[in-house]
Image: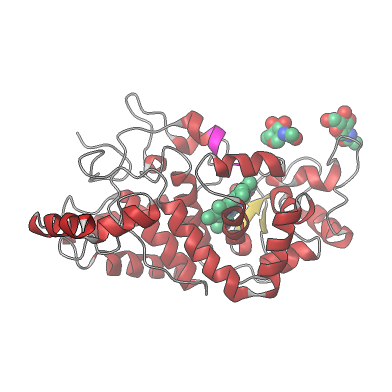
Amino acid sequence: MVHYIIVITLLALGLSPHCLSSKTVGGGYLYPQFYDHSCPKAQEIVRNVVAKAVAKEPRMAASLLRLHFHDCFVKGCDASILLDSSGSIISEKRSNPNRNSARGFEVIDEIKAVMEKECPHTVSCADIMALAARDSTVLTGGPSWEVPLGRRDARGASLSGSNNNIPAPNNTFQTILTKFKLQGLGIVDLVALSGSHTIGNARCTSFRQRLYNQSGNGQPDNTLDQSYASQLRRNCPRSGGDQNLFFLDFVSPIKFDNSYFKNLLANKGLLNSDQVLFTKNGESRELVKTYAYNQELFFLQFAKSMIKMGNISPLTGYRGEIRQNCRKINA
Ligand code: HEM
Ligand SMILES: *[C@@H]1O[C@H](CO)[C@@H](O)[C@H](O)[C@H]1NC(C)=O
Ligand SMILES: *[C@@H]1O[C@H](CO)[C@@H](O)[C@H](O)[C@H]1NC(C)=O
């Protein structure tokens, strides 16, 4: 009864009742039809530009997927990661997780430029990133989902948030799980979302420690397959070559599938943060096995967890703004 009255009131105000259901089930006030009237071409524009960028460079799918994650873990999914330094803003692009690593900003700029022509001041940079992450997943062979929309863009960035909230590849399992829990995500989300590492690259510096001196005793990580390790050492020397690139999933590096989890079963996860999902916790080990044996379950959970991650503290209503240029706040 109360629900009906609220829905009718919303309809009378010209608002969609979907925001009610999204709020009550998902937490957050986002809903997929947000731009249906204000910018019906919004989703198509994102899809087209992302498809073009990924056709040109397959790795871009991975880079765009990661951008959304690094945005959401810092003050919520508010496009704070896209801001360049200027005035009182210190860009998150300088943080340890992002420096020499986060990429795809030019693609977001291109989407935004087309979007501003089609529907000026309407579609947020934060929503563009959420859509680009979904489209990148689909384009590389992964699952699809309806992206709840209606995020607005932050008027500030947080360098310390970026350094502290985003897990590092040498964090312990417990630290990583804690960082997920602080965002309202759980162990199931952690394992499913780590499945993103089925596409994309990592630099030598992100896993070198495992190859030479994992625990300070001069020995490689004993949870890393030895022949895989010696292969990695060829292009990731003890010193130098920090920026040399390696596939996160050497089996099918540009295909979104469940081979990432199969690799973990074979002690062939690239990052320490990948392998610990299989070696340091019973519950997460079982989840890794489940997804390694059943790609469909992985895909279903991945979509659910992406929606959950995309719901982290969005700015809605009159909070935040719709940036005209994703790199700077409006004048
Ligand atoms: C669980 C904790 C996580 C850690 C410790 C972690 C760490 C990393 C590191 C170190 C890299 C390589 C960066 C470089 O060397 O340049 C990377 C790449 C990547 N990460 Fe994660 N990540 C985590 C979770 C996630 C999540 C939740 C997502 C997405 C939902 C994600 C998506 C990606 C993608 C797609 C890449 C490849 C990017 C590219 O090729 O440009 N990661 N991650
Ligand atoms: C993790 O890596 C960072 C950056 O290379 C380093 O400063 C830190 O000491 C490492 N932490 C551990 C526990 O090895
Ligand atoms: C390994 O790391 C420890 C502690 O960081 C250091 O004391 C030791 O010299 C290193 N060993 C080698 C062989 O690099």
Count of numbered tags = 0
Q: Position of residue 321 (x, y in %)?
A: 23, 41
| Left or right: 58, with 224 as reference point | left
Figure check: 66 above or below 158: below
The residue at the point 37 percent across, 61 percent down is: 131
The residue at the point 56 percent across, 55 percent down is: 189
Residue 103 visible? The answer is no
The residue at the point 10 percent across, 57 percent down is: 14
Figure check: 301 above or below 152: below
The structure's colour scheme is secondary structure
Majority SS type along the magenta span: helix
Figure check: 84 above or below 121: above
In depth, the one of 311 and 247 nearer the eye is 311
Q: Quadrant of residue 43?
A: bottom left
Q: Quadrant of residue 256?
A: bottom right
Q: Kindly give the residue lying farthest to the front in the view shown.
A: 1
The residue at the point 30 percent across, 38 percent down is: 328
Figure check: 213 above or below 284: above
Q: Position of residue 277 (x, y in %)?
A: 71, 54
| Left or right: 199, with 124 as reference point | right
In depth, the one of 74 and 185 nearer the eye is 185
Q: For the C terminus, give its image quadrant.
A: top left
Q: For the N terminus, give its image quadrant.
A: bottom left
In depth, the one of 187 and 146 nearer the eye is 187
Q: State which region is magenta.
A: 163-167
Q: Kindly give the residue lying farthest to the top in the view shown.
A: 88
Q: Position of residue 120 (x, y in %)?
A: 16, 53
Residue 202 visible? The answer is yes
